[in-house]
Amino acid sequence: MQGEHDVVVCRLGHRPGRDERMTTHVGLTARALGADRVVFPKNAGQSLETVRDITTRFGGPFEAELDGEQGALIRDWEGAVVHLTMYGERVQDVEGEVREAHAGEPLLVVVGGEKVPFEVYDHADWNVGVTNQPHSEVAGLAVFLDRLFDGRELEREWADAEQVVLPEETGKTVVSPEELEESERDE
């Protein structure tokens, strides 16, 4: 299901045993930085379960799913397609164009894992590089989403959370939404 203004991240390829953490972090980054959904390859069930668990505990809305036909997802996408790669145009040179295109149609952001078939480069509306230097695809996704949303995703409100992390200089405090409301009333 595809909405008019959805941002969907497609994790292309997954090598079990080698990519578990990276694939999971692509999904968590997509969720935390404003995407509406992540699509993992069929063999990334562990990453799917982790992202769904985090969404349940820390809020949504956000969807995660498995798809064994990612090539078809990219080919049949009704909207703009951005492929994040170190061999692309500089993000700072195309971000306005991508943002403008996304204002009227859904956006698919493809994040490769293993060797990306040439068809992905060919089908993408933009092949976008963040620094054009070797680095993590998670870092590239984070920078791209922050640029796409102009930082607005950092102020996002989360619904239906079981837990809330309190921002603080040091330490780690996690409370229920009810405890948060109570502490805000007491201030």
Image (spheres, rainbow, N blue to C red):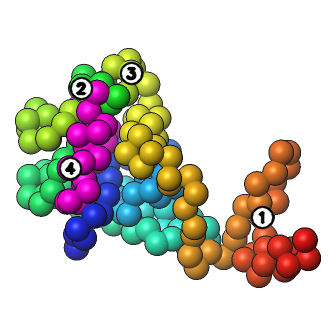
Q: CA distance from mark 1 to mark 4?
A: 38 Å
What stretch of residues is rendered in magenta?
93-116
Q: Secondary structure at mark 2?
A: strand
Q: In which quadrant of the rendered image does the N terminus lie?
A: bottom left
Disc 1: which residue: 174
Residue assigned mark 3: 131
Q: Are marks 1 and 4 in contact (CB under 8 Å)?
A: no
Q: In the image, residue 60 lies at what x, y percent?
A: 51, 71
Residue 167 as seen in the image, left or right of residue 51: right
Query: Which residue is most to the right?
Result: 186
Q: Which amino acid type is marked by label 1?
A: Val
* Residue type highlighted by circle 4: Ala
The CA distance from mark 2 to mark 3 is: 9 Å
Residue bearing the label numbered 2: 88
Looking at the picture, which amino acid does disc 3 mark? Thr
Q: Give the quarter of the figure containing the C terminus.
A: bottom right
Depth order, front residue of 115/124? 124
Q: Is residue 84 above or below residue 152?
A: above
Query: Pointers 2 and 3 in contact (CB under 8 A)?
Result: no
Q: Is residue 168 above or below residue 157?
A: above
Question: What is the C-alpha distance between the residues marked 3 and 1?
Answer: 35 Å
Residues at marks 4 and 2 touching, judged by CB atoms closer than 8 Å? no
Name the element at disc 1: strand
Q: How many marks?
A: 4
Q: Residues within 10 Å of mark 4 (few under 14, many from 20)?
A: some
Which label sits in the foreground, 2 or 1? 2
Q: CA distance from mark 3 to mark 4?
A: 22 Å
Task: Please give the residue where the numbered disc 4 appears in the rendered image.
Answer: 101
Q: Residue at x 82, y 60 (%)?
A: 173
* Residue 168: % across, % down: 81, 51
Q: Which callout, 4 or 2, points to the residue nearer the camera?
A: 4
